[in-house]
Amino acid sequence: MKVLMKGNEALSEAAIRAGATLYFGYPITPQNEIGEYMSRRLPTIPGGAYIQAETEVASINMVYGAVSTGRRAMTSSSSPGISLMMEGISYLAGAELPAVVVSIMRGGPGLGNINPEQADYFQATKGGGHGSYRMIVLAPASVQEMTDLTVLAFDLADKYRNPAMVIADGNLGQMMEPVELKDSYPNNYDHSDWALTGAKGRKGHTITSIYLDADEMEDYIHKLYRKYGEIERVETRHEEFLTDDADVVIVAYGIVSRVVRSAVELLRAEGIKAGMVRPITLWPYPKAVLRKLADTAKFFLACEMSMGQMVEDVQLSVEGRRPVYFYGRSGGNVPTPAEVVAAVKQRM
Amino acid sequence: MIDPGPRLTVISGAFGTGKTEIAINLALKLRAEGRDPVTLVDLDIVNLYFRSRQKAYELEQLGIRVISSVEGMENADLPALSPEINACFDRKDGPVVFDLGGSDLGGTVAAYLHRGFASEPSHHWLVVNPYRPFNQTAEATVEMAERIATRARLPITGMIANPHLINETTPEIIREGLARVREVTRYPLVYLSVMEEFYVPGAFDDLGVPVMVIGKQMKQPWEPGGIMMAGKRGKRCP
């Protein structure tokens, strides 16, 4: 049976049904429903715990400790709070730990405001934290996907022993849509060869990201990059909408893809052959599909709620073979379908 | 015809049950019936998304007085209310609809106005959508409702059934949902609200409850007439 849920509530319930029993976080708008939901639900679950940490720095390090035991754990925050978590995310990647971080973007830089933005794309996909690492980044575009991609984030984190982020914006977190949840989702990854579960009767496990010798460190980084290469090969996800004959390919993710879908329909009604590519994984980025569409499309337009961040990945994918333009709004303003239509026509 | 009883109506409920939709529609209906002035008071200081004040400009064009936070602070994450709210009780000049924030936290704000509410009778209507996570059983609904009533210092006098799944609503969803709301026997059922796109004249006459047909107010940015989070410039979807 379907339930009517906010994005923030839906992803929380999905995490619980995927076996996440531990949540650590610090309040920040517009993602407070996640903490509220977890604080209600987790204490009623066997082995469940909810902790409001003293800061986001503490939250991410509590996650580090929790997932080191092989349990599913998560944290969530919004832009300034996610900035504080970056050191911990680098440590999670460095120690190959499977954690899920939910980022509900708001306006920035600095304190910014509590309105929806997509200006933390660079932070999520290009490092954010220090060192040679990659984080899996999933971008839902509906409340149903907030649940589905949260479940997937836990699976990919476990499968690759790597942090995974679900990235959305304040509007997606707050809006309500009908969702369908399964009673439970499979959670049967075997972590017994590395997790800290008590060394009685066996050799102890060590979880660390320190390699003092240069060659050892380099070998370890190469091992990580073999894993990242595998993730790029196997886990890239995207959706195409009316791209088969498209002269104009609009690239948008998350909530902006909802606006762009309407814009594509409006353009088609006027006889303009527009289509959309919606990256579902922001890292790994769906480069191949854009590269292929560059054979037939006349130009690309990246639409974002930022001053232009993902547009750089579109440019890298298209490799200079077609013009790549950008249209964006910021400050918490969500573009309208009419604005996107005008942005396309202006470039024709 | 909207209940001509008490001048003051407080709309409360769990998060996301449709309080703001109902409150705005109620104010619009009162205005359409010629009541003047009609005042809508946005008391939601819990959550800054999808609040009445985002419709303030349009409502004011229709002759509805909207009172919310201090001007210029609409997007601040602060529990700030306009002192003008107290004037609603003093003026005694027309119906006032109070849109409370979600859950018992949201209810607390009404307690701050309890001297005003003590000065004349009011409705306190609870909005229930049984398709929302914390309204799924009668026990959960009553537990939340009583927490709201206690924190608001206002007993609940009626219940508005608002059973829907937004664009996936069907007549069956409405009927089944209403039956589940009726499992809450503690409060009288005053209205069944039905979004206009799912309303068929006569189709709900057998249900034995007045139907309030409501227009969807808080639309998404990609829908025609969608509301924007921000922007003093007051951008609207065409």
Image (cartoon, rainbow, N blue to C red):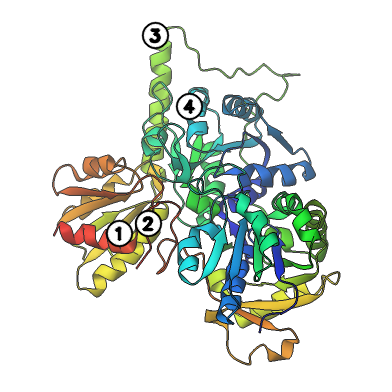
Residue at image point 55% right, 73% down:
B168
Residue under circle 2?
A257
Residue nearest the viewer, comparing B157 with A251: B157
The residue that mark 3 highlights is: A214
- The answer to whether dots 4 and 1 both sit on one chain is yes
- Chain under callout 2: A
In the displayed orientation, state which residue is furthest to the top. A213
Disc 3: host chain = A
Q: The residue tagged with tag 4: helix, strand or loop?
A: helix
The quadrant holding residue A276 is bottom left
Q: Nearer the viewer, residue A281 or B31?
A: B31
The kind of residue tagged 3 is: Ala
Asked if the residue under mark 4 is in contact with the one under mark 3, i.e. CB atoms within 8 Å, the reply is no
Give the Cα separation between the discs numbered 2 and 1: 8 Å
Residue at the spot of label 1: A276
| Of marks 3 and 2, the one in the foreground | 2
Viewer-side label of 1, 3: 1
Q: Would residue A296 be seen by someone viewing this image from the given angle? A: no
Question: Element type at marker 3?
Answer: helix
Pick the front one: A113 or B36:
B36
In this figure, what is the number of numbered marks?
4
